Image (cartoon, rainbow, N blue to C red):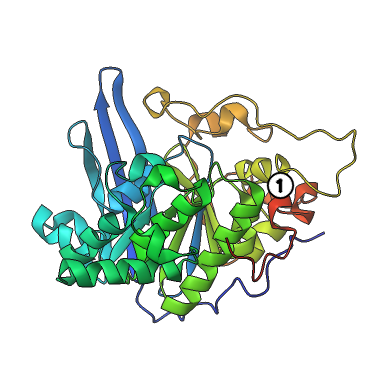
């Protein structure tokens, strides 16, 4: 049974002659540690077009967030360093800009919603002042005008009584409201690119669905390109146009959302889908787990990084690193020597119900 793809979640495919808004080209971000060089991002490439939502999925430690922080130029140096590649925003390589030039883009043209609102928001400053500071820095407004704009942003993200909430501190808000504040902060300067790093982490399922619906509405209204970093494939099915699957710092599969859910070709992608809870599963049924853990990149010597956890692996997989190759068409890429064998298997049962949290219609719900 095919995945339940939300019919309104997907935009028309960008034309081949349309220049990407953001292009990550063979990016490598390394960290030099006592134990050795950690290749957190190792030759990753993907693009984002205006109005498109790109999902980036994988387990913790696969390099999703480090890629996003690289785009924002927020990697601490040392121990981090850019070992190769380029990050082009409207054709300009961000890695070649000075810090002063980058500050004009960061938070202004490219914004990011970070994972944990409590650690990202300043606990001794009111919500309004924190949003207003960003507006004053990039939009050159006076404080009074910036505070009015901050109130408007809280109203935009559907926070009740924004005139009162703008004067409150982070600890006075619920988890869902703090996440909405993070969205308001990220959108305060009308960015062209929004990076959402696990925007629903630690929220209950009702609030998760509301936040996802809110992001979809705001993207439609503002026309942003959105990079959705998540481990929840239900969120991917509900919101994304294309999906990049990362493992151990590399891209292992990329396809449109429909194609990926209907025919996953990398064993790791299939394993992620099979480990999802399904509403149509029997009571006796067990979730399938992926054995082992993501290996530390400085421990990887050669071959496919997933070989030690993969039931399809053969000797070649342990000796050679599979390159990304076209799997039938240019819009479906996979890094696996045995992708044709993988594609012949029955789709995982979990595809029938991407996420319990998104099985309900929360349209019109406000908090």
Residue 364: x %, y % from top left:
64, 71
Quadrant of image for the C terminus: bottom right
Q: Vertically, is 58 above or below 48?
A: above
Q: Position of residue 86 (x, y in %)?
A: 25, 56
Q: Is residue 215 left or right of residue 354?
A: left
- SS for dot 1: helix
Left or right: 222 in relation to 3: left
List x then y, in percent, for residue 85.
26, 52
Outermost residue on the front side: it is 164
In the rendered image, the quadrant that contains the N terminus is: bottom right
Tell me the residue that label 1 is attached to.
341
**Relative to 352, residue 163 above or below:** below
Is residue 218 visible in this depiction of the protein?
yes
In the image, what residue occupies the spot 71% across and 54% down?
A: 354
Which residue is at a point 37% across and 72% down the rendered structure image?
A: 152
Residue drawn where x is 62% and y is 57% of the image:
209
- Location of residue 129 in the rendering, given as x and y in whole percent from the top left corner: 25, 56
Task: Tell me which residue sits at (46%, 78%) in the image.
Answer: 221
Drawn side of residue 98 relative to residue 214, left or right: left
């Amino acid at each position: 049974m095919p995945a339940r793809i939300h019919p309104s979640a997907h935009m028309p495919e960008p034309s081949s002659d349309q220049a990407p808004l953001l292009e990550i080209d063979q990016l490598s971000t390394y960290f030099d540690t006592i134990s050795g060089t950690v290749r957190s991002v190792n030759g990753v490439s993907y693009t984002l077009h205006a109005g498109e939502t790109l999902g980036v999925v994988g387990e913790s430690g696969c390099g999703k967030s480090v890629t996003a922080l690289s785009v924002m130029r927020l990697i601490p140096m040392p121990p981090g360093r850019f070992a190769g590649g380029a990050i082009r925003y409207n054709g300009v390589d961000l890695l070649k800009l000075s810090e002063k030039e980058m500050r004009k883009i960061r938070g202004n043209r490219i914004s990011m919603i970070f994972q944990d609102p409590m650690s990202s928001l300043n606990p001794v400053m009111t919500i309004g002042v924190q949003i207003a500071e960003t507006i004053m820095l990039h939009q050159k407004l006076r404080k009074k005008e910036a505070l009015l704009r901050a109130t408007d942003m809280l109203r935009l993200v559907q926070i009740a009584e924004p005139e009162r909430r703008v004067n409150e501190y982070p600890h006075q808000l619920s988890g869902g409201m703090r996440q909405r504040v993070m969205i308001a902060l990220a959108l305060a300067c009308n960015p062209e690119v929004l990076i959402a790093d696990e925007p629903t982490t630690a929220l209950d399922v009702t609030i998760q669905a509301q936040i996802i619906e809110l992001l979809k509405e705001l993207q439609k209204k503002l026309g942003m390109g959105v990079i959705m970093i998540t481990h929840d494939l239900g969120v991917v099915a509900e919101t994304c146009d294309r999906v990049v699957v990362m493992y151990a710092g590399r891209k292992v599969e990329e396809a449109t959302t429909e194609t990926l859910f209907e025919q996953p070709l990398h064993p790791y992608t299939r394993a992620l889908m099979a480990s999802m809870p399904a509403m149509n599963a029997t009571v006796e049924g067990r979730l399938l787990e992926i054995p082992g853990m993501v290996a530390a990149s400085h421990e990887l010597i050669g071959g496919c990084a997933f070989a030690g956890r993969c039931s399809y692996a053969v000797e070649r997989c342990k000796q050679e690193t599979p390159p990304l190759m076209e799997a039938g068409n240019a819009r479906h890429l996979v890094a696996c020597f045995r992708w044709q064998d993988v594609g012949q298997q029955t789709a995982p049962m979990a595809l029938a119900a991407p996420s319990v949290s998104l099985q309900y219609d929360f349209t019109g719900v406000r908090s």
